[in-house]
Image (cartoon, rainbow, N blue to C red):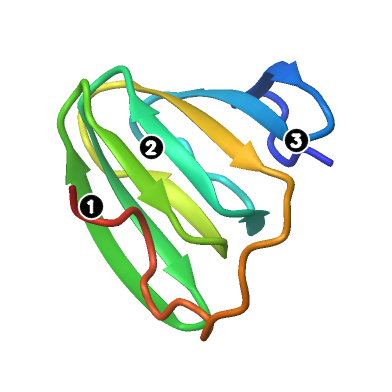
Amino acid sequence: MITNPSLYRVVFENERVRVLEYRDGPGDRTTPHRHPDSVMVTLSSFRRRLASGGRRVDVEIPAGQVRWLDAQEHSGENVGDTPTHTVFVELKEEAPARVAAARLGPAEP
């Protein structure tokens, strides 16, 4: 299932991965949604505010970055003054057993 279909588009999918293209503009928001473990590729620079479970974090990422994103549920808002263009490669396989990630947003490189 894809939330916010005006912002996300499936560009490829098979039994192991789903690849999503995400685009938004300043002030655009997403409803709460879930990502499995993913690789995020930023095609534009952006500033976003992510929220989950009463926590909020602001992230600013330049274009051309490749980041790991632990499975998480969040909502987001473009708090910058430029459009966001990102690709997510979502893994469909179960992650190895581990403690749930406490991080909200992408990991540092």
Q: Is residue 43 above or below residue 41?
A: above
Residue highlighted by disc 2: 27
Nearer to me, 10 or 24: 10
Residue highlighted by disc 1: 59
| Mark with earlier residue (2, 1) | 2
Instruction: Name the residue rendered at 39%, 67% in the picture.
Output: 104
Q: From the image, which quarter does the N terminus lie in? A: top right
Instruction: Name the residue rendered at 53%, 57% in the picture.
Output: 75
Residue highlighted by disc 3: 16
Instruction: Name the residue rendered at 37%, 28% in the picture.
Output: 41
Q: Is mark 3 on a helix, strand or loop?
A: loop
Horizontally, is 55 left or right of 19 in the view? left
**How far apart are the alpha carbons under marks 3 and 2?**
33 Å
> Hey, what amino acid is under mark 2?
Gly
| Mark with earlier residue (3, 2) | 3
Nearer to me, 21 or 3: 21
Q: What element carries label 1?
A: strand
Circle 3 crowding by C-alpha within 10 Å: few under 14, some 14–19, many from 20 = few
Q: What element carries label 2?
A: loop
Q: In this view, does 55 lie above or below 73?
A: below
Nearer to me, 82 or 9: 9
